[in-house]
Amino acid sequence: MKGCGLEREASRAKGEEFCRRAREAGAGLALFPEMWSVGQTFFDAKTAGARERWRAQAVGRDDAFVSHFRRLARELEMAIALTYLEKWTDRPRNSVSVIDRRGEIVLTYAKVHTCEFDVERELTPGDRFPVASLETESGDVKVGCMICYDREFPESARLLMLGGAEIILTPNACTLDAHRLGQFKARAFENMTAVAMTNYAAPQNNGHSVAFDPIAYEIEDGPARDTLVVEAGEDEGVFIAAFDMDAIRDYRRRETWGNSYRRPRLYVALASEEVEPPFVRKDATR
């Protein structure tokens, strides 16, 4: 979808329309692009009062905007991964709540890797990568989330895999080029998890919402297969990513990636707070 900016009612109405279309197409879960409640809109820091007006757009989990989609999920009997600027104690958060088909929030995730090199420094980063069991018409599935820049850090998907995630939902808001799509495909392969990403349509971003399954080889030592499930173009639309969870689970039981042969005792440096040149950035925090 293309965003509606700070027009919250327009975002609510358009989001509902697309959810209904997704359900009619057979979807069991609808995934929004990043920070849908404000259309991934920020503010002009040079304009007096702009920051305060933008912060006032943040909503809590009990706000009418979120409650509306909880009722919609219950009505449609479809899970909804809803994204919004979340009200927080200080700076707001960039969050996604996974609402189950009964209208209950089973997981809320706030973007951990906020882009501190730009206006996203105005956000409070999240501090964990939760995983939850989501009931669907086809049975329970373990889901986790990462948002946009999170997917460029292999640790994000790795932690979700270690937490038991079978599908990683990824709201997005940036240009998806061959490199970023390649990264995302790799996250599925190396963690043996399915991944699905929704991006804003052109001209806000460039679309190319995409999903990959992790099944690189259908049989042991067999030929490689294309793991692309679906890739959208640049225009608005509803696109269905169908995952065969039985096949994915069989693959996870027999193949060698994921957590099968890792050596965590050798990875101590991955948790180090030290940063050496050329990667020192004055605006970065840990």
Image: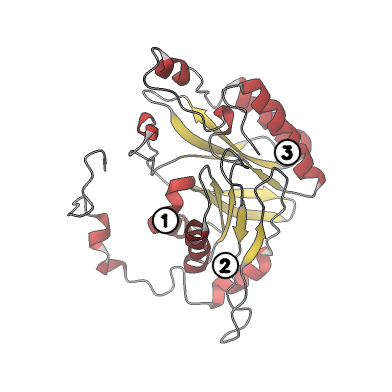
Rendered location of residue 234, percent (x, y): 65, 48
Q: Earlier in the sequence, mark 1 or mark 2?
A: 1
- Name the residue beneath numbered marker 3: 19
- Badge 2 crowding class, 10 Å Cα cut-off, few under 14, some 14 to 19, many 20 or more, is many
Please tell me which residue is depicted at 56% across the width and 42% down the height of the picture.
Answer: 205
Mark 2 element type? loop
Against 11, residue 244 (above or below) is below
How far, Cα to Cα, is label 1 from label 2? 16 Å
Q: Amino acid at mark 3?
A: Cys
Give the residue at the far front of this rendering. Answer: 203
The foreground one among 12 and 5 is 5
User: What's the amino acid at mark 2?
Assistant: Pro
In the rendered view, how is the structure colored? secondary structure
Count residues near mark 3 (Cα–Cα under 10 Å), then give few for <14, some for 14-19, many for 20+.
many
Q: Nearer the viewer, residue 240 or 66?
A: 240
User: Quick one: label 1, few (<14), some, or many (20+) residues within 10 Å?
Assistant: some
Foreground: disc 1 or disc 3: 3
Q: Which residue is mark 2?
A: 214
The image quadrant that residue 77 belongs to is: top right
Q: Are marks 1 and 2 in contact (CB under 8 Å)?
A: no
The residue where tag 1 is placed is 159
Q: Is residue 3 above or below residue 231?
A: above
Give percent across and percent down for residue 138: 73, 56
The residue nearer to you, when weighing 261 against 90, is 90
For mark 3, give the secondary structure: helix
Which label's residue is closer to the chain start, 3 or 2? Answer: 3
Residue drawn at the location 55% of the way across and 73% of the way down: 253
